[in-house]
Image (cartoon, rainbow, N blue to C red):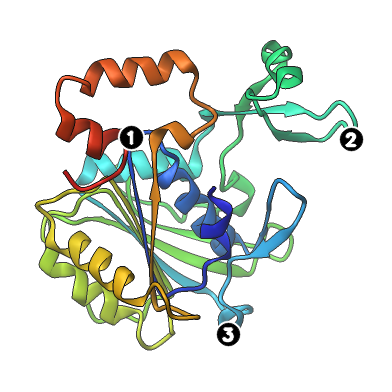
Amino acid sequence: YQEEFMRCTSSDVLVRGGNRSGKTFVCVVAVAAAAMNRLITLESGERLDMRPPHRKNECLTIWLVGNDQRHIATLHKFFFRTNDDFRIIRDDVTDEWRAWRPWLPEDEARRSETKAAPPIIPASYIKPDSFAWENKAQRVFSKVDIIDPITGKELANIYAFPSTGEVKAGEAVDLILIDERIAYPSHYPEWQARLTDRDGRLFWSTWPDISNRAIQDLTRRAKAEKDKPNPEVREFLWRSPNNKYLTARAHEKMQAMFGHDPGLVKSRIEGEYA
């Protein structure tokens, strides 16, 4: 169900979903692929290029926006650290490492052979000494440069900042990822404006925060354009039960956590506005 997002070419993309529906992870993968100039391989073997064609040989400017500094540390974990939530296994035919698929009986039987996936952006793609830290101990970074590990050419400059500060302005940007809620919805139009010069794109992965008018506005715009052949704005709605990596027990726990409140079930599991 995430592959349609990967094929999407709209300039503004809202991925709205329940907890553990895969919304952040898939956006991180798309941004990382663009930053490293790497292709994404779908389950069928089809390969997709996430880098804008008109910026194929250029150094991209990428912004990561989190709610606060703690959220920036979470994004650092997603991009640059070993991911124990995502398991890989050696394919018994090709002997290549691949995504583990626990919903397949033959993969579930080999659970003990899995290991944590390596960082989505490996250390070889990080320019030496290019991390700028706001708080190194807590992994709160403000900038890092991505390079081609063979040639050393700069492929992307990634900036990270919390939404709680002054709105960042005045720079042309290729790609923006906003993860979860933002402190000031009024900042969103300014971030959109940064994309204009380079015909850039914006991804926003979030649960449906009814109090955030910027999220609601994206939903309204996506609905208005849904019948266009090439919409500028698209919305993807993902439910937690869609995530086949979650066990039946995990789904039961989520129901137990939120089941007492129909509004929480609607937002936290179904991904709908409550």
Mark whose residue sits in front, 1 or 3 = 1
Amino acid type, mark 1: Asn
Q: CA–CA distance between discs 1 and 3?
A: 35 Å
Residue at x-position 63% and y-position 23%: 102
Q: Earlier in the sequence, mark 2 or mark 1?
A: 1
Task: Name the residue at the right extreme.
Answer: 93
User: Secondary structure under badge 3?
Assistant: helix
Residue 94's disc is: 2
Mark whose residue sits in front, 2 or 1 = 1
Q: CA–CA distance between discs 2 and 1?
A: 34 Å
Q: Earlier in the sequence, mark 3 or mark 2?
A: 3
Q: Earlier in the sequence, mark 1 or mark 3?
A: 1
User: Secondary structure under badge 2?
Assistant: loop
Q: Which residue matches tag 3?
A: 54
Query: Is residue 137 depicted above or below 174 in this figure?
Result: above
Amino acid type, mark 2: Thr
The answer to whether residue 208 is seen in the rendering is yes
